[in-house]
Image: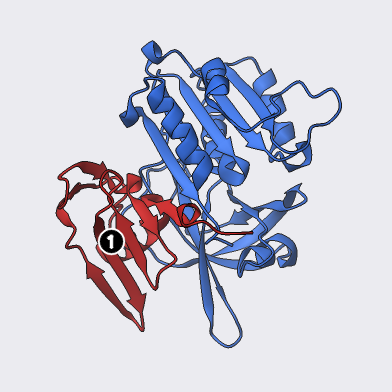
Chain colours: A blue, B red
Amino acid sequence: MARAAVLGRLNWQLGSVAELVQETPRVASLVLDVPEWQGHLAGQHVDVRLTADDGYQAERSYSIASAPEDQRLAITVERLDDGEVSPYLVGEVRKSDKIELRGPIGGYFVWKGGDDRPLLLVAGGSGVVPLMAMIRHRSASKSTTPTTLLYSSRSEDDIIYKAELDALSAAGDGLTVAHCLTRMQPPGWRGYSRRIDRAMLEEVAWPKQQNPIIFVCGPTPMVEGVAGHLVDMGFDPASIKTERFGPTGG
Amino acid sequence: MTVQQSDLKLDGNAIAGLLREIFTMEMTTAESTCAGCHKVHAVGQVEVYMNAPGAVVRCPACGQVQMRIVKGGGRYWLDLSGIRCLEFSA
């Protein structure tokens, strides 16, 4: 699976659902067997296409959650109740079902590893998915790149990959995870209790002298706010890569 | 929920698949020079609006429309008049 992405015309291919993981009440991961898969880079995505009985087709793009090293391809999908595709992928789909997909897609928002510069990852909600692929890639490749994930969720129940992030950050190989909960905090919560702001970024970000590589993914207003703060703080705009998602998904 | 125009803004990553169909290459790492302000951005960085009957791409520096892409009925319409130069790996 670790081969570099092969370019050329992208063909639709069939993946079979090997495993379903309910990550939060609204978010599920689909772990897929894709026999023709050519490998991917952490941060890339796939297009998923559903076809109705009458031939109507709907296509959506989902970030890949699995590491390039993983045997199976995983995507993580947030259910949007008025969406056309996500309510099927989160709630309807069953093990062994076939899913039509194509990919890997994208090359701008990717982290290949093999780089000593520290990594700052900033996620809002399901924007954590491509960043999780980077964290999983970092772990699978035994990288000790100093890495901080700042991850904003609405409530503790909405934190995707919580147990895995707890375990990876406890491994002591240089990964730190800072959570913020914007709407509801459990009693005794020790993380941040507000939206990501400049003061928070100043607390968690690597010194700019270390020239960190920065990836920001989440809803558009959050991504633009964070990127703006980071530029104001003096980070090189060329080192900040952003990926926005908005209400046109689903 | 009220949807603000700014919330509908995405970026070039959102049209990576569409551009891949057209160019048969990974295009988000391509660099486009704006015909309006002449600034250069990676295609992954440009502003993209998908809430039109196609994709509208704007320059993140000056807001000029760089690309309009419509796909339908088995055809593509590709207007690149807002791009002065598109540079990518062979």
Q: Nearer the viewer, residue A100 or A249?
A: A249
* Residue at the image position 46 percent from the left and 52 percent from the top: B6
Tell me where residue A2 appears, x and y as whole percent. Answer: 45, 41
Q: Quadrant of the C terminus of chain A?
A: bottom right
Disc 1 chain ID: B
Residue found at the very far right of the displayed protein: A187
* Residue at the image position 58 percent from the left and 22 percent from the top: A200
Residue B72: which quarter of the image?
A: bottom left
Tell me where residue A196 appears, x and y as whole percent. Answer: 58, 30
Q: Is residue A42 visible?
A: no
Residue found at the very far bottom of the displayed protein: A54
Residues packed near mark 1 inside 10 Å, few (<14), some (14 to 19) or many (20 plus): some
Q: Is residue A241 visible?
A: yes
Residue A233: which quarter of the image?
A: top left
Instruction: Describe residue A157's horizontal placement relative to residue B69 as left or right.
Output: right
* Residue at the image position 47 percent from the left and 16 percent from the top: A206
Instruction: Describe residue B69's horizontal placement relative to residue A187 as left or right.
Output: left
Q: Is residue A136 above or below residue A33?
A: above
* Residue at the image position 45 percent from the left and 19 percent from the top: A118
Instruction: Describe residue A49's horizontal placement relative to residue A5 as left or right.
Output: right
Q: Is residue B25 above or below residue A237?
A: below
Q: Is residue B15 above or below residue A118?
A: below
Q: Nearer the viewer, residue B1 or A7?
A: B1
Callout 1 secondary element: loop
Tell me where residue B44 appears, x and y as whole percent. Answer: 34, 47
According to the image, label 1 marks what residue?
B24
Residue A178: which quarter of the image?
A: top right
Identify residue type, mark 1: Thr
The mark total stands at: 1
